[in-house]
Image (tube, rainbow, N blue to C red):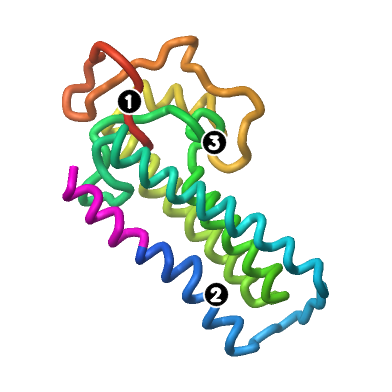
Amino acid sequence: MLKNIVISLLGLVVVWFFAVSLPFWTAAREFDPFPVELGSLRLIGWIPVVLGALVILWCYGVFNFVGKGTPWPFNPPIKLVVIGLYRYIRNPMESGIILVLLGEALIFESSAILLYLIFGFLLLHLKQVLIEEPRLRRRFGKTYEQYCKSVPRWIPRLKAYTGDDQEPSFNSREQTPRAGGNSGLQ
């Protein structure tokens, strides 16, 4: 468990770099291809920044304490967890990053950060479709396939996913049902 927490904390440093440090650096360079002036309305950007940061932290916690792993492929969760935000959207952590970037684009009135957000989203989407989802299909089989059919990748559903009123728990190493509770994260 301590190993997972340490790896997750190091992972948060990487997320901080891409979601906070690079956008701040971009804003400091005053590179702005399409200048936008929002005045005091720009302060509304703090709402998505705070919400996005809370979503990211929650996701890391769920990976550690429910999934028994980390978001990183070299130490993935043992269990597929379909709880909380993951019942509404398949990629809440990535959505949290997008929210943070959107908020920063508003706060700094920066079209450069907005372009960074768009490019970042495209990269995240490709990573999900080409790498993450195939890996999860191999690890969790039909359970993950059903989850993908029921829960959207990027736009949250309005009603929570229940897995046909059951939430089977599958160990990624066994591919057989286990008794009790929820399982891990994507």
The quadrant of the picture occupied by the N terminus is top left
Q: Position of residue 139 (x, y in %)?
A: 27, 33
The amino acid on which the numbered mark 3 sits, given as a three-letter code, is: Ile
Question: Was residue 168 drawn as part of the magenta stretch in this picture?
Answer: no
In the rendered image, which residue does mark 2 sit on? 23
Relative to 165, 167 lies left or right: left
Q: Position of residue 176 (x, y in %)?
A: 22, 16
In the rendered image, which residue does mark 1 sit on? 183
**How far apart are the alpha carbons under marks 2 and 3?**
25 Å
Question: Was residue 3 drawn as part of the magenta stretch in this picture?
Answer: yes
* Residue contact at pointers 2 and 1, CB within 8 angstroms: no
> Which comes sooner in the sequence, label 2 or label 3?
2
The quadrant of the picture occupied by the C terminus is top left
In the rendered image, which residue does mark 3 sit on? 89
The amino acid on which the numbered mark 2 sits, given as a three-letter code, is: Pro
Q: Which residues are magenta?
A: 1-12
**How far apart are the alpha carbons under marks 3 and 1?**
16 Å
Which residue is rendered at x = 77% and y = 81% of the image?
A: 35
Name the secondary structure under disc 3. Answer: loop
> Which comes sooner in the sequence, label 2 or label 1?
2
